[in-house]
Amino acid sequence: MHALGVRSNDKTFMHFFTLSAMREKILKVIRGYDLEEVVIGTLGSHSALNILRGAKDEGFKTLCICRKGEEIVYECFGIADEIVSVSDFLEILNPRIQEKLIEKNVILIPHGSFNAYLKDLDRLIIPFFGNRELMIWETDREKQRMWLEMSGLKMPKKFEKPEEIDRISIVKYHGAMGGRGYFLTSDKNDFYKKFKYLVERGVIRDIRDVEIQEYIVGANVYFSFFYSPIFDRVELITIDRRYEVIDGLGRVPAEIQLSSDIEVTYTVIANFPVVLRESLLSKAFKAARSVVDTSRRIAHPGLIGPFCLETVFDDKAEMYVFEISARIVAGTNVGIPNSPYSYLMWGENMYMGRRIAKEIKIAIEKGRIEDVIY
Ligand code: AMP
Ligand code: AMP
């Protein structure tokens, strides 16, 4: 057994060789960089404003890869020194574009759009901040569950098949789809009715793509942490909660809800900042440290930089973790220019985008850039 896989089978070893070959390529690229001229780049969406502003605050030049027609946002805020226009984000996998970015000493900062639109991160040889192996783990709900359970965290119960459903449950899909098409159900007949409806509308294709999870009634809290390999410590940067389409349901009187066929979805639209009861913070810090420890065992060298624990606190203030993201989440946008938590540790003007750039800057100064680039 080695650090990259839980089971030592042939597939794992193949994967190990692919990853080591990838690591060699990325190291070759970064060793050819002029580290005094590093440009921080990202895809123009999700948390790019946060990342690019953070890079500028730390003195880096910035580059934003935008889909044609979407450049306006990055031009208007004036935080991208260079904009590269593409018709589709997938174009960034094109070797000619990669070469151009490598010539400019670009370090990419991954975010939710990397998972949502690129999928094949293995074809990207531009160095990026963070552990891409864990970003691949994050897109697989089975692997996420394994990671969180190995860390000793309490998760909502998972039902293997619709026939097992015995309480209110939420039905979700793989990948960062932002909650689109999720639904609540409480028994198998209702499940199949809703499932059929979504299949007919092309939202889902296969029952194997869904995860059925116990629905925890409680307060949603999303913790955005930063693990610093340079300081070997976990920092709490922001806490947020989401504003989802379902939150509008409370504005519709109950009798109208019952008499009409309102479709509720968990599609995320925005985020709110949150400050937690102080007595509950210890649970979150313990959980964060534990997932960092586990990450080292499942995907060497473990977490680097931002990660998010998505939780629900129930009526007994018990914390359930239902998801983990191994990169910056868009909820950190509420923490620009600082959140109460980043202020406690860093004072004014520290937010996730800037914290990432600061780690890169310190890593370059200390000759440790290879420890934060994977
Ligand atoms: P976008 O660039 O807005 O299409 O987002 C890329 C991916 O990240 C999509 O899968 C979105 O659903 C997800 N995403 C974007 N913004 C947020 C947010 N504020 N909270 C949670 N997920 C988000
Ligand atoms: P996810 O795609 O896992 O981030 O879930 C999207 C949204 O669904 C979350 O922001 C929550 O509002 C809700 N959610 C997901 N899983 C659960 C759960 N087990 N219990 C309660 N709410 C959940």
Image (cartoon, rainbow, N blue to C red):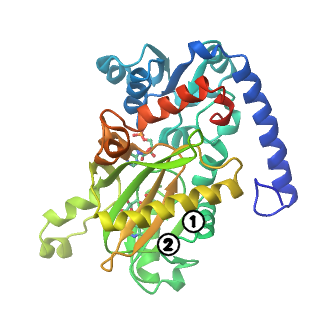
- Where 168 falls versus 102 (above or below)? below
Looking at the picture, tell me which residue is in the foreground, 303 or 194: 303
Could you tell me if residue 294 is visible in this image?
yes
- Where 70 falls versus 219 (above or below)? above
Residue 305 bears which disc, if any?
A: none
According to the picture, the residue beneath numbered tag 1 turns out to be 148
Could you tell me if residue 263 is visible in this image?
no
Residue occupying image coordinates x 44% and y 18%: 59
According to the picture, the residue beneath numbered tag 2 turns out to be 155
The N terminus: image quadrant:
bottom right
Q: Amino acid type of disc 2?
A: Met
Residue occupying image coordinates x 70% and y 33%: 123
- Where 125 falls versus 117 (above or below)? above
Tell how many labels: 2
Residue occupying image coordinates x 61% and y 63%: 147
Residue 80 pos. (x, y %): 41, 18
